[in-house]
Amino acid sequence: MRVLGIDPGTATTGFGLVDETERGELVVADYGVIETQAGTPMELRLLELYHKMQELLFLHRPERGAVEKLFFQRNVTTAISVGQARGVILLALAESNIPVAEYAPLEIKMAITGYGVADKKQMQQMVQSLLRMPKLPKPDDAADALAVAICHLHRYRLDDLSLMGGAE
């Protein structure tokens, strides 16, 4: 199964494609960031993000999508723009008939490190280890997107086991 993990943002959106082999191994298919130019009107940035998402979906043909949920701290302006980016991303996935799951940052950290308050470096190191990558995945947004994809593959596997009555 191929999963596209997304760490949404207006300026920078991280993406990570992870394949799970029939033997249950996780393999990186691709990862990186989609960037939009600061100072460009928001509607044009969102349009660019949408078109780049369509290209990614066409090129890689993921079977599932996983998107990080909005984590609201203090900056309302940032939260609104991330919410707009999430909407465009969810639209592109829905238009391509790709089932989508959404995960909170805490869920992702727990799935990757087993520790809900893991820092960026710990997350990158675990993603590197789980995917047997020769070096730390960078930039941070791409590493986060890979973590979202891994989180979904772990969750999907657990949900699959519970439907079969558990592993015995």
Image (tube, rainbow, N blue to C red):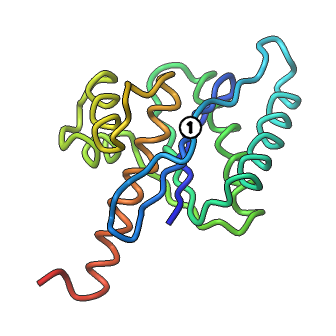
Q: Residue at x 25, y 45 (%)?
A: 110
Image quarter of the C terminus: bottom left
Q: Residue at x 40, y 42 (%)?
A: 147
Direction from residue 38 to residue 78 in the image, left or right: left
17 to 76, vertically: above or below: below
Q: Which residue in the rendered view is the most extreme toward the top? A: 39
Residue 16 lies, in percent from the top left, at 54, 42
Residue labelled with disc 1: 31
Of residues 80 and 63, the one drawn nearer to the viewer in this rendering: 63
Of residues 9 and 120, the one drawn nearer to the viewer in this rendering: 120
Residue 137 lies, in percent from the top left, at 44, 28
Q: Which residue in the rendered view is the most extreme toward the bottom? A: 165
Give the residue type that dot 1 points to.
Answer: Tyr
Q: Secondary structure at mark 1?
A: strand
Residue 65 lies, in percent from the top left, at 57, 57
Residue 38 lies, in percent from the top left, at 77, 13
